[in-house]
Amino acid sequence: LPPNNPWAGGQRVATVERVVELRDILPTFCELGGIEVPEMVDGKSVLPLCEGEEKGWREYIHGEHTSGERSNQWLTDGREKYIWYTQTGRELLFNLVSDPTELHDLSKKKAKQTASWRKRLVQALEGREEEFVRDGELVIGRPQNPTLSEPGTYGER
């Protein structure tokens, strides 16, 4: 490690209540090693989070599953999880704190929160090649390929 790296000596422990992803591992290792993060890498180093710097960190993560009728897009902030099924329009909302196994759908009971998550998903999917969004609304039934023809072109949200 570079001598000026605060993680170089001693043991340090930090618990951070923010969402991180596998894509954050490489930038973290690059920073620890004192090397530049390759331009094509989407993630971010978690070291600033461990130092208490949360400004500019993502509020949620977006994921997707491609599986025919069960294809879905999802968002989570680690406390709640919203799922939208692309072929049926079904929506699910879970409180991950009280229901970590996602057994109790709250989407109808918490309609305002569901609408708020839907709005975030619209922002996350805007400009995607599948055209999941039209006039600010999610479009049901769009074909979804397991691999985008231009990966990484719709940017970080």
Image: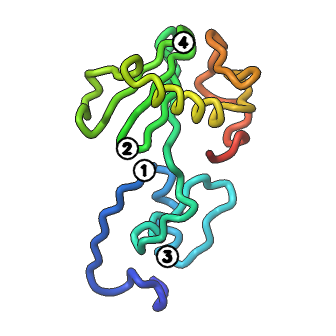
N-terminal of the pair, mark 3 or mark 2, is: 3
Q: CA distance from mark 4 to mark 1?
A: 26 Å
Secondary structure at numbered mark 1: loop
Q: Which amino acid does the dot numbered 3 rest on?
A: Gly
Task: Quadrant for residue 7, please give it.
Answer: bottom left
Which residue corresponds to mark 4?
89
N-terminal of the pair, mark 4 or mark 2, is: 2
Q: Position of residue 89 (x, y in %)?
A: 54, 12
Q: Which amino acid does the dot numbered 1 rest on?
A: Val
Which residue corresponds to mark 3?
33
Q: Position of residue 61 (x, y in %)?
A: 50, 43
Q: Which amino acid does the dot numbered 4 rest on?
A: Gly
Q: Are marks 1 and 3 in contact (CB under 8 Å)?
A: no
Q: CA distance from mark 2 to mark 1?
A: 6 Å
Q: Nearer the viewer, mark 1 or mark 3?
A: 1
Residue at 69% x, 60% y is 39
- Where 110 sits versus 142, above or below? below
Which residue corresponds to mark 1?
19
Using residue 47 as the reference point, say whether residue 27 is left or right of it: right
Secondary structure at numbered mark 3: helix
Which residue corresponds to mark 2?
78
Q: CA distance from mark 3 to mark 4?
A: 45 Å
Q: Are marks 2 and 1 in contact (CB under 8 Å)?
A: yes
Q: Residues within 10 Å of mark 1 (few under 14, many from 20)?
A: some
Q: Toward the viewer: 129 or 149?
A: 129
Task: Quadrant for residue 93, please give it.
Answer: top left
Task: Quadrant for residue 92, please give it.
Answer: top left
Q: Nearer the viewer, mark 3 or mark 4?
A: 4
Q: Which amino acid does the dot numbered 2 rest on?
A: Gly
